[in-house]
């Protein structure tokens, strides 16, 4: 059974095309947003937002992907049959300028942006075919060589009019906020690590050299492809130095890293390999790695212990 969307698009679920916005399925993986300010309102509006994008862009859309973090994501087809991805993001600060970054990168190192609806926070994106995650590459060194090659393609300066947030400003904010979050979470690790992160914020934020558009959330789950063709997805962009963009990658494959026989040695090897291959100062990459791990580990939504453990490893390196 199938029925066209009233505005020309189609939404599919389990092979059945749905007519109304109310019938658009919302993945259970987004339910955690009910505990976030504005989350419940966005979830209630989501079917209407999806249906609007589907109709305006005349798409055929499959069942949404379940594990999507803060976005509604589904495979789609353009009217001419071109495979694509439809993504509607919860309007948060970190992802605010994702479309701007993808437009700047223009398919070099990242998926292409086909269309953007700012009012709905909707993006129509290139679909990676094949789209295996970099996590499928089993050897850590091999995966990091691939990751480095993608980062080299991504990094480029932005114009003075670009809307991206400043890493220098964010470092100042982290220096103020981290002690507050540390106390709120019950002082979950030795104070020396927090003090080191605050010190790095002051030292690194105001001493950056060339600034580029950083991905910020660059890890194996956000790099898709196969063989010689790999592309980044899901940036949380900001304007900062290259060394900062190693932060998420340094704590990638956390389960494997933290459960291994020599976690500190493995972290040191990763830090040395990436900083050398990408031509960034090792200590600046290490400092930003500590800062970012705590900034995202002492989250407002809760404590994320693996990030704290990775910050400890970097402190030992």
Image (spheres, helix red, strand yellow):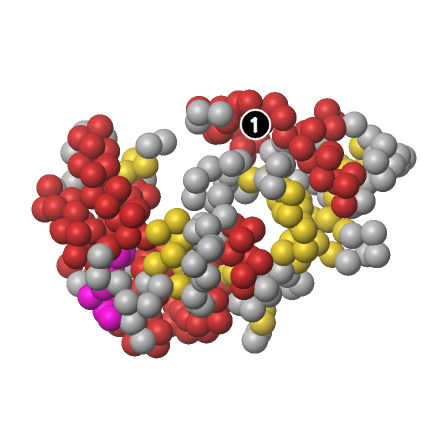
Q: Secondary structure at mark 1?
A: helix
Where residue 307 appears, as percent x and y from the top left, is: 30, 47
Q: Residue at x 30, y 47 (%)?
A: 170
Of residues 287 and 221, the one drawn nearer to the viewer in this rendering:
287
Q: Is residue 217 visible?
A: no
Residue 204 percent across, percent down from the top left: 21, 58
- Residue lying at 35% horizontally and 51% vertically, measured from the top left: 166
- Whether residue 97 is situated above or below residue 299 in the rendered picture: below
Q: Position of residue 14 (x, y in %)?
A: 76, 38
Q: Is residue 240 left or right of residue 308?
A: right
Q: Magenta span: helix, strand or loop, mainly?
A: helix
Q: Is residue 289 magenta?
A: yes
Q: What is the quadrant of residue 226 in the picture? A: bottom right
* Residue 126 visible within the image: yes
Residue highlighted by disc 1: 42
Left or right position of 299 against 41? left
Magenta segment, which residues? 281-290
**Residue at (81, 40) in percent of width and height:** 9
**Residue 173 percent coordinates (x, y):** 26, 42
Q: Nearer the viewer, residue 198 or 68?
A: 198
Q: Compared with residue 285, is residue 146 higher up or lower down, i.e. above or below?
A: below
């Amino acid at each position: 059974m199938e029925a066209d969307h009233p505005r020309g698009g189609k939404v599919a679920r389990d092979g059945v095309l749905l007519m109304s916005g109310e019938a658009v399925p919302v993945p259970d993986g987004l339910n955690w947003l009910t505990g976030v300010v504005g989350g419940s309102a966005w979830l209630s509006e989501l079917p209407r937002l999806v249906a609007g994008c589907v109709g305006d862009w005349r798409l055929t859309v499959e069942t949404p992907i379940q594990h999507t973090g803060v976005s509604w994501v589904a495979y789609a087809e353009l009217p001419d049959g071109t495979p694509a991805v439809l993504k509607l993001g919860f309007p948060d600060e970190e992802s605010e300028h994702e479309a701007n970054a993808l437009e700047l990168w223009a398919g070099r190192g990242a998926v292409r942006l086909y269309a953007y609806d700012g009012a709905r926070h909707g993006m129509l994106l290139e679909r990676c075919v094949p789209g295996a995650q970099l996590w499928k590459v089993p050897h850590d060194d091999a995966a990091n060589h691939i990751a480095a090659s993608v980062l080299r393609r991504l990094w480029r300066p932005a114009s003075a009019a670009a809307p991206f947030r400043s890493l220098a400003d964010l470092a100042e904010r982290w220096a103020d906020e981290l002690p507050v979050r540390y106390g709120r979470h019950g002082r979950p690790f030795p104070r020396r690590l927090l003090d080191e992160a605050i010190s790095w914020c002051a030292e690194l934020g105001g001493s950056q050299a060339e600034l580029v558009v950083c991905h910020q959330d660059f890890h194996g789950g956000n790099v898709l492809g196969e063989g010689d063709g790999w592309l980044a997805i899901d940036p949380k962009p900001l304007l900062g130095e290259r060394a900062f963009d190693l932060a998420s990658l340094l704590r990638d494959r956390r389960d494997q890293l933290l459960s291994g026989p020599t976690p500190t040695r493995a972290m040191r090897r990763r830090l040395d390999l990436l900083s050398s291959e990408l031509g960034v100062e090792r200590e600046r990459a290490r400092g930003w790695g500590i800062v970012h791990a705590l900034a995202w580990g002492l989250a407002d939504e809760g404590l994320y212990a693996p990030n704290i453990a990775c910050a400890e490893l970097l402190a030992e390196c």
